[in-house]
Image: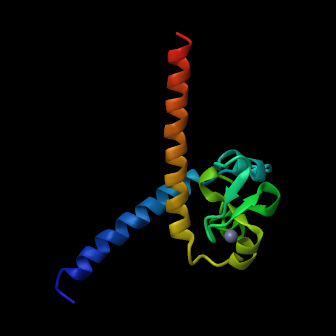
Amino acid sequence: MGIFDGFIKNIAEDRQNREIVEMYHDMQERDPDYRAKAFDNTDSNHGWYTCPRCGRKFRADDMDADHIVPQSRGGSDSRYNLQLLCKHCNRSKGNDMDDTWDDLKRRERELRQQDRDDVKYLNELSRKNR
Ligand SMILES: [Zn+2]
């Protein structure tokens, strides 16, 4: 290990932790209807949803709304903390947090893309109605 390796690793960890803290502040949100929110904020292909864990496609009835940071560990009902998993993957996930970081980053990317698509759609609508 070189002299700077530890230093560089610390900077990377610091940035990652700052992002986690920022995300965490966005997550202080409760919503009793979080299942509907998870569906509203997930793209489907004519009613088929892709499970991000196993990559298989399911109908809505076979998908669970999962809290990426488990509720038992303080995870909230923010759309950033909700993802749809198939029942099998959701059961096998349980309370473990091995994939939490990857899931949060993936979810953030998905929602940013959805927001961009929504803005594009609204722009097109307003152009047509001019
Ligand atoms: Zn799955």
* 129 and 25: which is toward the camera: 129
Residue 2 relative to residue 74: left or right = left
Q: Where 47 sits versus 100, above or below? A: above
Residue 88 relative to residue 44: left or right = right
Place of residue 46 in the rendered image (x, y in percent of width and height, measured from the top left): 71, 46
Residue 111 in sight in this render: yes
* 97 and 116: which is toward the camera: 116
For the point 52% across and 54% down, which residue is it?
A: 108
Residue at the extreme bottom: 1
Q: Where 48 sits versus 53, above or below? A: above
Place of residue 63 in the rendered image (x, y in percent of width and height, measured from the top left): 76, 61
Residue 30 in sight in this render: no
Residue 120 relative to residue 43: left or right = left
Place of residue 87 in the rendered image (x, y in percent of width and height, measured from the top left): 77, 69
Please state the quadrant of the image where ligand 1 appears.
Answer: bottom right
* 91 and 59: which is toward the camera: 59
Residue 31 relative to residue 119: left or right = right
For the point 51% across and 68% down, which residue is it?
A: 102
For the point 56% across and 21% down, which residue is it?
A: 125
Residue at the extreme right: 61
For the point 43% across and 59% down, which residue is it?
A: 19
